[in-house]
Image (cartoon, grey):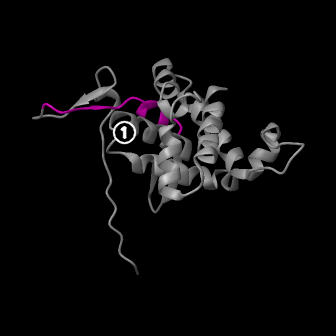
Amino acid sequence: MPEFQIHIDLIPFGKLEKERRIYLPGSQEELSVLGFLEVLGTPVEINYSDFILRMPSLAGLTILKLLAWSDRPTHRSQDLGDIYKIILHYSDLHFQEILTNHPDLIPQDSEPDWILIGAELLGRHAKDIARESKELVSKISSLPGLTQNQSIPNPFAQIWSGQFGGTLEYTRQIANTLARGFSR
């Protein structure tokens, strides 16, 4: 059986937070917990043995990774890489939902680009989670990779192109499509 080393961050939030931050005891360090209540308010539940494990959905994880990246963009490019990997498979995971509830995502006049369809659906799902908090929606909407401003370099597109190949034009299109889904 292969061995895995997995790093898990356990971060307290909820009743322990003050103004969307937690202050670690015996330390001057503080952590933002913006989005935690919203993301974990709609968890994926996994039954394991005698207990239920509640964890963020992929859309919720995307929100948390966007927020983590925004706090330290020069140190957290892997968060954007993880989001890209989610986007690559999102339409496969939600194929039936796309056909049933989001047929508007499938173009009628051209072949569907399932990566772009997944990106827009992921944006929609993330917005559904974030919708309860104006602060959270504002923070995510203002991220430089999600502004859809064509006149400035898109950091998401640059990181995705550098980490995974592909053209800047296409990775910018993916970022813009994710943003369009979130802005709905």
State which region is magenta: 28-43
In the displayed orientation, state which residue is furthest to the bottom.
1
Residue at left 59%, top 41%? Answer: 172
Disc 1: which residue: 73
Q: Amino acid at mark 1?
A: Pro
Residue at left 31%, top 48%? Answer: 9
Residue 43 shows in this picture: no
Q: State yes or no: residue 118 in magenta.
A: no
x then y, percent, for residue 84? 54, 50
Q: Helix or strand or loop: what does disc 1 sit on?
A: loop
x then y, percent, for residue 119? 64, 43
Which quadrant would the C terminus be assigned to in this image? Answer: top right
Residue 37 shows in this picture: yes
Seen from the viewer's position, the closer of residues 72 and 23 is 72
Above-or-below relation of 34 to 45: above
Which quadrant would the N terminus be assigned to in this image? Answer: bottom left
